[in-house]
Structure formats: structure tokens, C-alpha cells
Image (tube, rainbow, N blue to C red):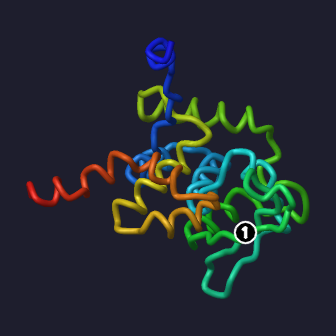
Amino acid sequence: MSGLNKVNRSTSKQAKPLTEDKILLLLETATLMEAALLQVQRDGLLRISEVAAVQWTDLSVMADGTGCLLIRRSKTDQEGKGHVVFLRKQTVDALVAYGVQECGRIFPKSTCTLRRRIKRLTASVLGEEGYSGHSCRVGMVNDLVERGASLLAVQTVGRWRSQSMPAHYARNILAGQNAVAQFMG
């Protein structure tokens, strides 16, 4: 029976990572809303439900043009204690270009609609399937780990309870950095 369980066990299908190079390609043809969506989701390592819920009043723009975005509630923060994420100046600029409003959600679309927009954009520009509303989050994890960020640092910024998910997302990058890879040069 245990052998049958191993055969029938299916691995979850991992969203393809939208790494920095792919994001730059997407931004060349993205609408203002899509450009803001991709950059906010990537900078903050936001889940699609988190990006769909953020409001204009959650955004604070700093004197240097960077921003802080309050995530009021998330999968790992059901009590709603909140978490603040950093946004690059380019991301704040994309939000301003998209159109600042006084109130309401920044992306007044359902999570399903936002997922479809990302899938449609990636399919048309990159010519590949397998990208999802989680691809910006997975891509940023890969980019951070590739540039030397520790799993603990990635866990913290991504608001995970353990290092297991960042390690899973970056498993190919980590394999290329392990002792054998370093030894073999």
C-alpha cells in the first residue's frame, strides 16, 4: 500500500518564476495597470489575494520617491496585525502613472481577473504557459536567493512562517550553489 501511495502522490504544479529579466520584457508591452500590478506584486512578494486587497490609503510615499505599502491581512496574518513592504521608486512611479485615487482598492479587480491578466500577458509576450498570479512572488524569491539573500531574509520579507517555501521556490538556484556545485566550479 505504501508503494501505491508513492506512485499516486502528485507533486503540486509550481508556478513559473517571473524573474527580473522576464518582468522587464513584460513591462515593454504591459498596460499601465499591468505594469503597476507586476511591480507592486514583485517588490512586496505579494500573494495575488494581497495585491487585490491593497488600497490607495495603504501606500505611503517617502521623500526619496520610494514607498511603503501596508498589507493589512494575509494568509499568514489572519489576525490582521499588518505588515509593511518596501516599494522601489520605479514601482511608485508606475502606480502614479496608473492613476492615484483618493480611496478604494488600487487594483479594483477580483483575484481571478488579476490572475487572468497575468496569464494572458505572459502568454502573449513570453510565448509560454505556466505563469500565474504567484509567478512574481516565486520570481523574486529566485532573484533574491541568486543574489545571495539568505533563506531567513527571504522568509521574513515574504512573510512565511518557515524557510521551507522559499527553499522550495529557489530549489534550482540552491542546487547550483551547493557544495558540489562550488567544488566543481
Residue 8, percent across and down?
A: 50, 14
Question: Looking at the image, which residue is at 42% across and 68% down?
Answer: 150
Question: Looking at the image, which residue is at 75% across and 38% down?
Answer: 111
**Which residue in the protein does label 1 denote?**
69
Would you say 171 lies left or right of 131 here? left
Compare residues 180 and 149 and report the one nearer the observer. 180
Name of the residue lying farthest toward the bottom: 63
Q: SS class of the residue under badge 1?
A: strand
Question: Looking at the image, which residue is at 41% across and 46% down?
Answer: 22
Residue 95, percent across and down?
A: 68, 62
Residue 156 location, quadrant: bottom right
Question: Looking at the image, which residue is at 62% across and 79% down?
Answer: 65
Compare residues 83 and 20 and report the one nearer the observer. 83
Identified by mark 1, the residue type is Leu
Name of the residue lying farthest toward the front: 1
Residue 40, percent across and down?
A: 63, 58
The quadrant of the picture occupied by the C terminus is bottom left
Name of the residue lying farthest toward the left: 184
Would you say 22 lies left or right of 158 here? left
Compare residues 126 and 77 and report the one nearer the observer. 77
Total residue callouts: 1
Compare residues 86 and 57 and report the one nearer the observer. 86
Q: In this view, does 143 lie above or below 3?
A: below
Residue 128, percent across and down?
A: 42, 28
Crowding around mark 1 (Cα neighbors within 10 Å: few <14, some 14 to 19, many 20+) is many
